[in-house]
Amino acid sequence: MWAMIVKEFLELRRDRRTMAMIIVLPLVLLVVFGYAASFNVNDISTRVVGPRADQVAAELRGPFDVEGVDPAADEAAARDMLRDGDADVVVVTGTGPSTALVDGSQLFSAQTAVAAAAKSDGRLRPDVLYNPDLKTSWVMVPALIGMILTFIGTIITSIGLVRERQAGTLEQLAVMPFRPSDVIVGKIAPYFVLAAVDMVIVAVVGSLLFDVPFIGSPLIFVVGGALFLFTVLGIGVLISTVSQNQGQATQLALMTMLPQILLSGMIFPLESMAAGVRWIGYLLPLTYFIQIANGTMLRAAPISAQWIPLVVLAGMATLVFTAAVLRFRRDLAPRRRATPPSGPERTAPLAGAR
Amino acid sequence: MSRGEEWGAWGVTVAHGRHLALDEVTLEVPAGQVAAVVGGDGAGKTTLLRCLTGAARPRSGRVAAPSRREIGYMPAATGVWRDLTVAENMEFVGSAHGIRGKEFQRRRDALLEPAGLAHVLGRRAGNLSGGMLHKLAFSAAMLHRPRLLLLDEPSTGIDPVSRIDLWRLISQTAVDGTAVALATTYLDEAERCATVLVLDAGRTLRSGTPDEVIAGVPGTITAVRTPPDPDLAWRRGRIFHAWHPGPPRPDEQPISPDMEDAVVAAAIHARHTADGNERGSR
């Protein structure tokens, strides 16, 4: 038995990734759950409009965090602000009690805002838009689409590519008359198509089963989804280039998925997280896809309100996918830098030839 | 190059970091011949073939090989897609080389019939026996009629009958004019080839025709029941063959070595010489 224990420790010591998971993962989970796991929203981004805007803004207390006051704006403008994600609550003032227009697509902020309005002795009348019944499923379905795409993009893609390496067929592909780009695109395209089909299925089934609306532009959703898919597929390819077998690829893919699920705002609201952890959320592609999916499906946010997450995703997609392709290409075809594939015969004199 | 062409690697050195995988190794692969590369694990056989495919970049030396479209390669892991059927594997390789339609069918049948695979077109490659898998890999590597065929341990791990079948295919390929280079650990296979290159830890121990390699055995080999020095002997059936670097002693009856004796003796000689040099330098 002692020999078994020693052998197991020796193997573990050499399996650095498993060791990293054993040591680093509990620390990560501790930090994440300690600083990020909070459903309490203490500050709700709020704007106040209408003739009594200045007076009402001065009266508003926490959790409403007044970020802007515009006495000249009317209710239509207030609704636009909410739709565009400029604020989670817009208070419309008039002669009677003020109306707090609440963005129901920001579930936890909305719940907190409704609860706070209920304690205002009738001075603030809440009107929840985009998710009037504050259903969790309406917020979760757009986020789940992102999570499913992440799963396919990273885990399935990396496993598929590593399987090719493990079976020795990647070596065969390197010798066949393919350009590296043929191999990379050929390997990734099926996963891209499958993930895209999955995206549509989940969106449709989610809408049918949970009555989640899709009121925005399908084009923005598709573009956002495609950019997000390129990013997660790129992560999958990158993982495959540093993994020797499918177990390693799965391990690494899970390590990239976990922070995305926990820190993207999918489960815990970003605004509730400690600033020291929140910035990690802003580095994750799922954060931006959720913003796009949420804005498009629930609020019909126009492109002018969605360009930031779209541009960030485009940047991430370019960066990650380029890195992935370069690494994959290096693994696949070291010689092709030196020898054109179309050459009729290859007689390659090399340095030091005799 | 035209027919009568000669592919190969001349004075090739390949380094993996500080480790020399190949040290000034030369392999000539003329058209219509089979050139064998033999050696133990880590000898550099696969690296040498990878130099010819272009997958390994030599630090120095010269490599002459046709373009990728004219190279057929069968890696040690067969390079067959196990989740595809026999037919699908051939179709994929055919598509990669732009061979389609009737021409593809004609070539596929011409390869799979003699390989005994024509009746298992719909079977997944992962469900084939080891011998069938190797023959499928060979057929796929030959589908586009390469000018240079590179086979990395094509018969390792397959049964003797399948080995005979596979060798029939390899021989026919060479007869048809293809230049064939194969890495193998089976010395009886090497003995059938036109030339043999013996590698050990990336260095050339011997090269030439099988007769030249056997004739070039240094020292003396004898058959003994009890080896005088176990480090200089190897088992052959119920007896041992023993080697020493000098000429035959008066009481010794040297044997006629075969390829196995020649390669083992060359390896022992290399080690013996290296040990001697090491002792001398201390």
Image (tube, rainbow, N blue to C red):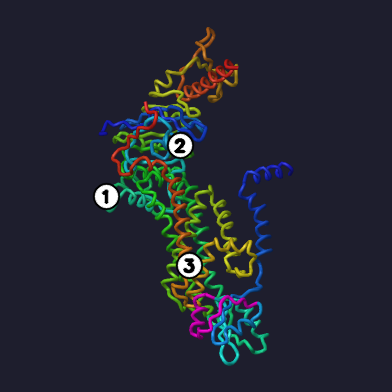
Identify the residue shown where x is 65% and y is 72%: A39
Identify the residue shown where x is 45% and y is 22%: B258
Residue at label 1? B103
Residue at label 2? B160
Q: Whole-percent x and y of residue B81?
A: 43, 50
Horizontal relation, residue B274 to residue A26: left or right: left
Q: Whole-percent x and y of residue A49?
A: 54, 83
Q: What element carries label 1?
A: helix
Q: How far apart are marks 3 and 2 (CA)?
A: 66 Å
Tag 1: residue type? Glu
Tag 2: residue type? Pro
B103 is higher (above) or lower (below) than A344: below
Residue at label 3? A308
A14 is higher (above) or lower (below) than B25: below
Magenta span covers which residues?
Answer: A63-86
Q: Is residue B120 visible?
A: no
Q: Whole-percent x and y of residue A176?
A: 37, 46
Horizontal relation, residue B4 to residue A74: left or right: left
Q: Residue lying furthest left in this view? A: B2
Q: What element carries label 2?
A: helix
